[in-house]
Every structure is written in C-alpha cells, then in structure tokens.
Image (cartoon, rainbow, N blue to C red):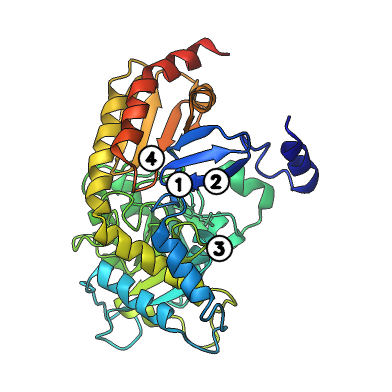
C-alpha cells in the first residue's frame, strides 16, 4: 500500500472502500497516477468529465468568473446563473403538455432550480412533487437517484435503502420497462412517476421502445407529474442533449441533471417544465451554494464547447466504436446504451477482474455488478483513445478470466 493510501484509510470515512489508485493529473481522456503511470479514462469521473480533464474552456471560464465574482448567495442574482437557466430551458425545448390539473400561471416554458449535485437536484424535484398536494410516488426497481434521504427513498436498490429506513414518503416500486406494472401502480393520488431514461448505476439498462411514451400517457391520464432523472444521461452523454427529455412524445414535467453539467465542477439542476416550474414558491426551498456563478460559468463553458467541438456527434461515433469493440469479444454476451454511455454484459461473474486487468493495462473501467461493465468516458474521447482500447480489449478480458 502506498503512503497516500494509508493516509487515505486513516483520514477518510470508509464509505467507498479502498481507492483503486491515487490520481494526480489529467489531460483530455487521459489521467496519470502518483507514480506517473498513464491511463485512458473510460469512466470519466462517473459520467462527469464531459470535456475530459483540464479542458481549457472550463479552466478559462472558472478562472475568469472566480477572479471577477465567485459567490454572492441567493439574495442576489448573477449573469451566469440566469444565462445557464435560459440555456437549459432552450435545450429542453418548449413544453408540449399543459394540464389544468396543475397549478401555476399558463404560458411559462418552465423554470430552473440549481443545486450542487444530482441527489440535491432530486431532493428539489421531490419537494416540488409534494406541492401537487399528493404524496404517492412511483419509482423503478433497479433505479438510482442518490444518497440523501429523499432520493434514497426513491432508489430501487434495497441494500442502499435498508440500513437507513424508515425513509420518507410513500413509494411504489415497479419493474423497470414494464408498462402494465406502471399502469397498475399510478392512481389519481400519485404525485409523480420518476424514471431514468436509461438506468445508469444498474449497468446501463434500456427500457423497451415506447416505455417512456407509455409513462407519459399514464401520468397524463391521472394528472401525475412525469419526472425524468437525467443526472447521468443528460448533457450530451447519449449523443443528444438529453436521452429523452427533448422528445415531444415523452415531454416530461420535471427533469433533473447534474453529473456532466459542470464538466467536473459540482452543479446540478432541477428543471420544472411548463407549469411544474411554478410549484415551488418563495420559502419552499433554498440552497447556499446552488447556482453560484463559478459553477454556472463552468456549465455554460461545457454547453458551448459541446456545441463548438461537435461533441454530440463525437459521442455517437466513439460510442458506436466502443460498443463494436465490446461486441466482438467472446466474453461479452450483450452491449447496451447509447452514445458514450455503454454497458456490457459478461458471460460470467468476472467484471471486477476485468476492471483490475484493465487498470493494469492502463484503462480505467467500471463494474456496476458482478457481470456488468459500464463505460462513460469523456465526450472528447479521441480516435487514438478508442484504438488503444481496441488493441488491448481482448487481452484485458482474457487476463480477467485467468485471475480469481
Ligand atoms: C449519480 C446519479 C445521481 C446522484 O448524483 P450525485 O451527484 O452523486 O448526488 C442521481 N441520479 C442518477 C441517475 C445518477 O446517475
């Protein structure tokens, strides 16, 4: 064990287990550890480092904003915050569903609440759903919505929930991707249905075609909000700005984003679309740091760079290449996902060994379960990064199967 790892173990709570490496710098989709070893980062800080590491656009935006105005509190506004809220609403597009069942003035395209993380974006959304006057929620088995108590109450993984029960709320879990189960669970007392368009932490699980459209139809029928958690899938990850929130046939009322939004600077957002944007009123919610100018400036730089560098297309193309590499391995029995959110099902329970063999070969990979891998690399992933993985992939998988 290195000295840094001993110091880590002595000083940090053991919530994450021992760290795999101590990393000291990064550039693009490459990172270096404290011994100077180079790795291709195919995890991207768990779908966070959209522009990779040390991208000049983020460095410049943060530096400029921090040396101008770093923090003001929410008693005051700042230009980056207003512009970012407008940009996010632009990216979602106009609301296509306006229901009389919902309070608030008609005509607004929606409103944004900024947070510092994904779980906080979901807490804001959860509080927003309470303002419908209803408390029942429907969430999916296998879902992940965060670790704070409210978001945890909606998270489908019992092992995360059970040590902290009782959790708030009245939540019904339904099998993900099953439209009949959804139809049965939603009633006129359901405040919201919360779904990930693709389940990320579950191992990049896609619902069958038409599932989210059904969720929209069912919620509309009952005056229930449709809330999409795009914390992992949003901001270009799947090759479009959102995995589903822009789709007029899905047209959610609430969208939460975080991970990739700040390109590594902590920021999240809860978007209330159409009238849902007016459910939270003065005094209902707050945050000290949320929407701070530095984080908002970073997010604006991320969005501008995704546009100027054509990173939506890059995510699609590089994602297709990564999926192809995985699909061609005999140990891989299924590939899922879109753009640069790629899942691989293995022929046996050796995903942790693949992660270890990958690391030894100079690649940062992720196992979401005993037999599932997830890749969520930076959207700036380059040809030679993909080629390096293509050259090493077969050896990594073979080495993994030989290690216990
Ligand atoms: C990561 C994640 C969260 C939680 O975000 P944090 O920033 O870790 O709090 C919530 N929902 C989804 C879908 C996620 O992938």
Comes first in the chain, label 1 or label 3: 1
Residue at which label 3 appears: 169
Gap in angstroms between the C-alphas marked 2 and 1: 7 Å
Q: Are marks 2 and 1 in contact (CB under 8 Å)?
A: yes
> Foreground residue, 154 or 404?
404
Question: Residue 232's x, y, as percent?
Answer: 41, 52
User: How many residues crowd mark 1 within 10 Å: few (<14), some (14–19), many (20+)?
Assistant: some
Identified at 50% across, 20% down, the residue is 350
User: How many residues crowd mark 2 within 10 Å: few (<14), some (14–19), many (20+)?
Assistant: some
What element does badge 4 sit on? loop
Q: Please, is residue 394 above or below residue 342 in the view?
A: above
On residue 27, which mark appears? 1
Question: Residue 385's x, y, as percent?
Answer: 35, 35
Comes first in the chain, label 4 or label 3: 3
What element does badge 2 sit on? strand
Gap in angstroms between the C-alphas marked 1 and 4: 26 Å
User: How many residues crowd mark 3 within 10 Å: few (<14), some (14–19), many (20+)?
Assistant: some
Residue at which label 4 appears: 204
Comes first in the chain, label 1 or label 4: 1
Q: Please, is residue 161 above or below residue 256 in the view?
A: above
| Mark 1 vs mark 3: in front | 1
* Residue 85 occupies quadrant: bottom left
Residue at which label 2 appears: 25
Gap in angstroms between the C-alphas marked 4 and 3: 27 Å
**In the rendered view, does 92 fall on the left or right side of 395?**
left
| Mark 1 vs mark 4: in front | 1
Comes first in the chain, label 3 or label 2: 2
**In the rendered view, does 47 fall on the left or right side of 162?**
left
Question: Residue 154's x, y, as percent?
Answer: 51, 55
Q: Are marks 2 and 4 in contact (CB under 8 Å)?
A: no
Identified at 43% across, 57% down, the residue is 138
């Amino acid at each position: 064990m290195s000295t840094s790892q001993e110091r880590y173990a002595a000083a940090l709570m053991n919530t994450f287990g021992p760290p795999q490496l101590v990393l000291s710098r990064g550039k693009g989709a490459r990172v270096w550890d404290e011994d100077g070893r180079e790795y291709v980062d195919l995890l991207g800080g768990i779908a966070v480092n959209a522009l990779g590491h040390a991208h000049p656009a983020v460095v410049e935006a943060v530096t400029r904003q921090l040396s101008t105005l770093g923090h003001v509190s929410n008693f005051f506004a700042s230009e980056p915050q207003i512009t970012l809220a407008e940009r996010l609403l632009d990216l979602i597009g106009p609301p296509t569903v306006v229901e009389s069942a919902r309070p608030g003035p008609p005509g607004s395209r929606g409103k944004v609440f900024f947070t510092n993380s994904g779980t906080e974006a979901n807490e804001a959304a959860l509080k927003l759903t309470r303002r419908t006057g209803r408390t029942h929620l429907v969430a999916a088995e296998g879902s992940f919505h965060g670790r704070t108590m409210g978001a945890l109450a909606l998270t489908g993984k019992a092992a995360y929930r059970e040590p902290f029960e009782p959790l708030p709320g009245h939540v019904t879990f339904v099998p993900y991707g099953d439209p009949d189960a959804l139809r049965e669970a939603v009633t006129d007392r359901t405040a919201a249905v919360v779904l990930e368009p693709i389940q990320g932490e579950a191992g990049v699980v896609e619902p069958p075609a038409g599932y989210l459209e059904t969720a929209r139809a069912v919620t509309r029928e009952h005056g229930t909000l449709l809330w999409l958690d795009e914390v992992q899938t949003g901001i270009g990850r799947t090759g479009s700005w959102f995995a589903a929130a822009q789709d007029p046939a899905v047209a959610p009322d609430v969208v939460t984003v975080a991970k990739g939004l700040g390109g590594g600077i902590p920021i999240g957002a809860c978007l209330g679309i159409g009238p849902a944007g007016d459910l939270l009123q003065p005094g209902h919610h707050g945050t000290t740091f949320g929407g701070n100018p530095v984080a908002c400036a970073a997010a604006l730089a991320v969005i501008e760079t995704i546009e100027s560098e054509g990173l939506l297309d890059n995510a699609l193309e590089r994602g297709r290449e990564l999926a192809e590499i995985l699909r061609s391995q005999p140990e891989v029995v299924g590939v899922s996902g879109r753009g640069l959110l790629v899942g691989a099902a293995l022929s046996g329970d050796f995903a942790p060994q693949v992660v270890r063999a990958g690391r030894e070969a100079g690649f940062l990979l992720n196992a979401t379960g005993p037999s599932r891998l997830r890749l969520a690399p930076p959207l700036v992933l380059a040809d030679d990064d993909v080629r390096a993985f293509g050259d090493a992939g077969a050896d990594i998988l073979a080495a993994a199967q030989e290690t216990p």
